Amino acid sequence: MKSILNQADLDSFSRFYRANLINCLTGTKPAMLIGTTNVNGATNLALFNNIFHVGADPALIGYVQRPVDQSGDTYRNIINTKEFSINWANKEILEQAHQTSARYNDDISEFEVCGLTPEYLEGCKAPYVKECHINILLELVETIPVSINNTIIVIGKVKHILIPNALIKEDGNIDVNADNALSIVGLEQYYTTKFEQKMDYAKVVI
Amino acid sequence: MKSILNQADLDSFSRFYRANLINCLTGTKPAMLIGTTNVNGATNLALFNNIFHVGADPALIGYVQRPVDQSGDTYRNIINTKEFSINWANKEILEQAHQTSARYNDDISEFEVCGLTPEYLEGCKAPYVKECHINILLELVETIPVSINNTIIVIGKVKHILIPNALIKEDGNIDVNADNALSIVGLEQYYTTKFEQKMDYAKVVI
């Protein structure tokens, strides 16, 4: 039995139920930690589930930043330092990764209180997460306001990728199963992946 | 052994290897089909792997549209009709869903050649996919140019959600496992999900 839910139905749900349902509509989302520093070098780490591919050449990754008055340090740090890291959360650090989403005061480093280790690549200000197998260091290239809900799309250009050789397949694809990479569905449901099939480039067949 | 890949390394890879690697950097992405019609009512269907959550209230979903001169009908149809559907690809239709990514001419409907069935909700121009368990009907609310690579972020507002009652959990979360929802890693690797853990809202603990 299929329900048809309209705006009136969405409005009738509790705030909690509606937030879960709507956050689930985009299915399986990557669970990734964004690492930054403020201008004094104090570190910050936060879990994001709305990171997306923007382009392959140049290599660009974006995320949706909530309205800035509701946000923590991540956006301010990115604007000030022009750098950030994206780190793949994995099953071994599920609880630590999730805990970074708590609303810690600005003077608290989530690295420290959540038990994750900041490391640095020479020449980069943004810390990456030692416990994540895959780390991406980016420089800020564009911030784009979304007028309809006052969010901001933040786009970074990939400068460095840290990745174990064993996680890259022959054809350049990343082995997410071997990484135990975590996905998020909705806000708080964590999943790993089960490989189904690799397809070939689809050709026109009529 | 962890590699550090820089721009020079990325440039040294074959186009194919680099495209796979960079498209994998954003991890597990939802595999979803976008359905549209042109102004004459001819249907179009295409697989997207760069769909993302923009906001819960109002309920907004976005996707990244490649530069328009490279694109097929989806964007043109959305601009002309102001409507589109997002349909969750599932394991049972993996091959049909993937096949919609082939570059069919504009006068071909991917529904027909790929063996998927268009259905309509009264009052909506955009077709949804019968074989997908979860269908979302949206109206166009914003298109935002990304200057760095000439892509366009297309944002729709959710008008209707078609979903089997059995796929909604008590708390409003969607059961992606029961749906056999497909994810894409890179361009052509398909995955289903394995449930790991549901966490509570993270509270500050120091």
Image (tube, coloured by chain):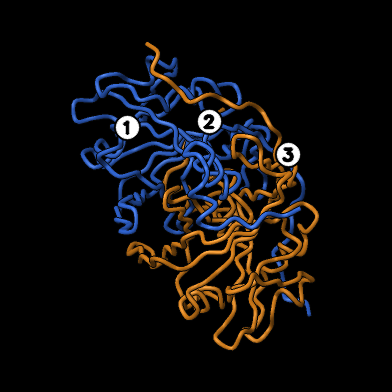
Chain colours: A orange, B blue
Residue A3 in view here: no
Q: Give the position of the N terminus of chain A as an image quadrant.
A: top right
Residue designated by label 3: B194
Crowding near the residue tagged with mark 2, few <14, some 14–19, many ≥20 C-alpha atoms within 10 Å:
many
Residue under the point 52% across and 64% down: A138
Residue designated by label 1: B36
Tag 3: residue type? Lys
Instruction: Work out whether mark 3 precedes mark 2 in sequence or the reverse, and give the earlier one.
Output: 2
Give the side of residue B11 with respect to residue B65, left or right: right
Q: Report which quarter residue A170 is drawn in.
A: top right
C-alpha distance separating marks 3 and 2: 16 Å
Q: Report which quarter residue A94 is drawn in.
A: bottom right
Tag 1: residue type? Thr
Instruction: Work out whether mark 3 precedes mark 1 in sequence or the reverse, and give the earlier one.
Output: 1
The reply to the same-chain question for discs 3 and 1 is yes
Q: Report which quarter residue A119 is drawn in.
A: bottom right
Element carrying mark 1: strand
Q: Residue A6: give x, y in percent of width and height.
A: 42, 44
The reply to the same-chain question for discs 3 and 2 is yes
Give the side of residue A61 with respect to residue B151, left or right: right
Q: Is residue A56 above or below residue B48?
A: below
C-alpha distance separating marks 1 and 2: 16 Å
Answer yes or no: do the residues labelled 3 and 2 have beta carbons within 8 Å? no
Residue under the point 68% across and 38% down: B193
C-alpha distance separating marks 3 and 1: 31 Å
Residue designated by label 2: B89
Q: What number of labels is visible? A: 3
Q: Is residue A161 above or below residue B129?
A: below
